Image (spheres, helix red, strand yellow):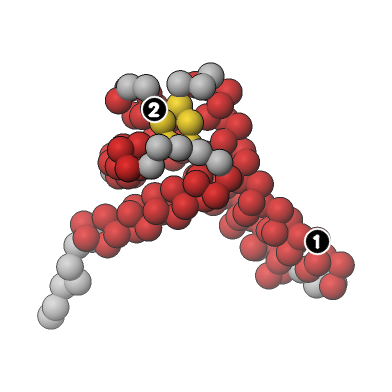
Amino acid sequence: MDVLVYVVVLNLAIEYFPAVISETFTLSLLTAVVLKLVLEGVRALKRLVLARLRTAARPVQKATAAAMLVLLLPGSKIVVLEVIALLFAGRVQLGGFFAVTGLILVLLAARAGVRWLLAAPPRVG
């Protein structure tokens, strides 16, 4: 389901933002799969760093975990740009750092919205 949401959002971005380019629909579908994999990896890393931050006993450990989190957030956008550039060799472009940051925020919001819409209603009784 997430990949389908990502394809829709990505293709809307391609249509309305000139900096976001994909030569074919197939490439946009593959890009959505890559984005899903990379973003899931980043989420897993973020959970690990947050767990380390919560369990840190000493101030140095807390500072190290906080620094890792601060580096992870912008670093993940750079990783997304580099992985897409490496895999698709210029046939797909997601714009620059700020464009990909906005795209990722919209992807995650759309994903959450679709999951909320498709969630089973709570049973009463």
Image position of 104 with respect to 28: above or below = below
Q: Are marks 1 and 2 in contact (CB under 8 Å)?
A: no
**Horizontal and vertical percent for residue 87?**
53, 22
Q: Quadrant of the C terminus?
A: bottom left
In percent of the image, x 70 and y 59: which residue is there?
70
Residue 44, percent from left and from top: 56, 50
Question: In terms of sequence position, does the residue under pointer 1 or pointer 2 come before the other?
Answer: 2
What amino acid type is highlighted by mark number 2? Ser
- Per the image, label 2 sits on a secondary structure element best described as strand
Amino acid of disc 1? Thr
Pointer 2 residue: 22
Residue 64: which disc?
A: 1
Q: Residue at x 33, y 54 (%)?
A: 110
Q: Position of residue 90 (x, y in %)?
A: 51, 22
Secondary element under disc 1, as helix, strand or loop, is: helix
Q: Is residue 37 visible?
A: no
